[in-house]
């Protein structure tokens, strides 16, 4: 099943591209480049001729036709569609060969369900006009898809003999790192979805204060419109402060925890490469986050920040995939 393993690798690489491209589309303010879904102004391609643009404007009078933004969104949709098709094929093959694959059949089946839900979130992102909870959930779904594909690929390309034996305490530390990472990504997604990244542009202070005036209640109200409170009033600067400040604190906690975990993993030579990569990407991610604030969120750096998060997911998932308990030894 070498070709099956190659298909998993290809899907994993494509998932990484889709996640990063999705971040770029959002940062380039092209998330609503097409006002409908799955097509664009009623077509499967972007209107570009004067006649097509005029027709699209007449059909969707509430939208401004911008082909450059629409193409960004549609390319993202095309790649996401191809990824969904590849995952569907992987699931079918896994089910037909469930006795031969190296993971429980529930994993590829769950991955397929997740991708279908991701497609629905992509549609709701457009139809619900970038509602923060939907945008954040879409980001988390993309990262989860990437993580599951990485685990699936790793389990099919690495032999059982190369797994690292650990005690239960260390395994808990490693497992918890994955939960903390995804929670921090959620905080980052919530910050981006609420356009709160530039509510404070200095570091480590926020407008000169270590603890600025904040409105946690409205900042972290889940079900509301973009830029609005649950009551329909405009979201205050204090609410945006709360969102970004919590993301900052989460970053500090995550860095501290990962450094501690890296120290623990120093006792396992088989994980030294991944431990070093983890620290390298973590430091770069932290510095890029600070640079985004000081340089007022340039698109290139902001996209690179999302790439860093995806790389941390890949590395952390591989570390988690490499370990097993001592009691499993025969």
Image: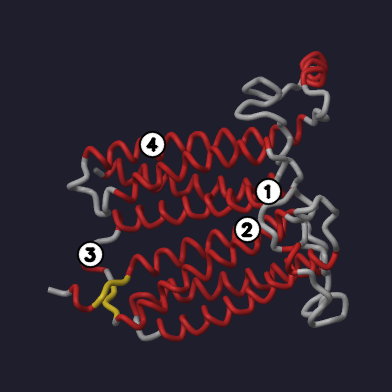
The Cα–Cα distance between marks 4 and 2, rounded to whole angstroms, is 26 Å
Q: Secondary structure at mark 2?
A: helix
Residue at 55% in and 47% down: 17
The structure residue drawn at horizontal position 56% and vertical position 33%, both measured from the top left corner, is 78
Q: Secondary structure at mark 3?
A: helix
Marks 1/2 in contact by CB < 8 Å: the verdict is yes
* Upstream in sequence: badge 4 or badge 2: 4
Outermost residue toward the left in this view:
330
Tag shown at residue 24? 1
Looking at the picture, how far across and down is residue 176, in whole percent?
45, 73
- Residue 114 drawn at (x, y percent): 45, 45
Residue placed furthest toward the front? 231
With 103 as the anchor, is 194 left or right in this view? right
Choose top left, top right, bottom left or bottom right for residue 218.
bottom right
Are there few (<14), some (14-19), or many (20+) residues within 10 Å of tag 2?
many
Could you say where residue 317 lies in the image, as x and y percent from the top left?
42, 64
Q: Which residue is mark 3?
A: 160
Sequence-wise, which precedes: disc 4 or disc 3? 4
Looking at marks 1 and 4 on the same chain, the residue that comes earlier in the sequence is marked by: 1
Specify which label sits upstream in the sequence, 1 or 2: 1
Seen in the image, is 7 located left or right of residue 284? left
Q: Which mark is residue 88?
A: 4
Answer above or below: position of 188 versus 72: below
Q: CA distance from mark 1 to mark 2?
A: 9 Å
Q: Marks 3 and 1, how far apart in space?
A: 38 Å
Mark 4 vs mark 2, foreground winner is 4
Nearer to us in this view, 200 or 69: 200
């Amino acid at each position: 099943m070498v070709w099956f393993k190659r298909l998993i690798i290809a899907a994993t690489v494509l998932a990484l591209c889709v996640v990063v491209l999705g971040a770029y589309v959002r940062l380039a303010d092209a998330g609503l480049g097409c006002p409908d879904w799955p097509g664009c102004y009623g077509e499967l391609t972007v209107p570009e001729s004067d006649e097509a643009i005029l027709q699209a404007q007449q059909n969707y009078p509430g939208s401004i036709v911008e082909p450059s933004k629409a193409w960004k969104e549609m390319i993202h949709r095309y790649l996401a569609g191809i990824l969904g098709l590849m995952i569907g094929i992987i699931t079918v093959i896994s089910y037909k060969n469930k006795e031969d694959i190296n993971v429980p059949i529930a994993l590829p089946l769950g991955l397929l369900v997740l991708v279908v839900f991701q497609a629905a979130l992509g549609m709701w992102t457009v139809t619900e006009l970038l509602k923060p909870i939907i945008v954040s959930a879409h980001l988390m779904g993309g990262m989860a898809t990437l993580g599951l594909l990485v685990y699936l690929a790793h389990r099919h390309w690495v032999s059982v003999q190369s797994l690292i034996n650990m005690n239960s305490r260390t395994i808990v530390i490693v497992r918890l790192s994955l939960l903390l990472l995804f929670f921090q990504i959620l905080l980052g997604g919530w910050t981006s979805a609420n356009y709160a990244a530039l509510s404070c542009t200095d570091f480590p202070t926020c407008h000169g204060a270590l603890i600025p005036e904040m409105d946690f209640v409205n900042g972290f109200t889940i079900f509301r419109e973009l830029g609005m409170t649950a009551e329909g009033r405009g979201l205050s600067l204090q609410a945006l402060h709360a969102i970004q400040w919590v993301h900052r604190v989460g970053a500090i906690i995550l860095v501290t925890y990962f450094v501690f975990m890296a120290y623990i993993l120093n006792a396992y030579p088989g994980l030294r490469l991944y431990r070093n990569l983890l620290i390298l990407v973590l430091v770069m991610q932290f510095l890029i986050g600070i640079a985004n604030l000081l340089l007022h969120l340039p698109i290139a750096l902001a996209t690179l920040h999302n790439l860093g998060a995806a790389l941390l997911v890949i590395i952390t998932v591989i570390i988690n995939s490499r370990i097993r308990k001592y009691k499993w030894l025969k």
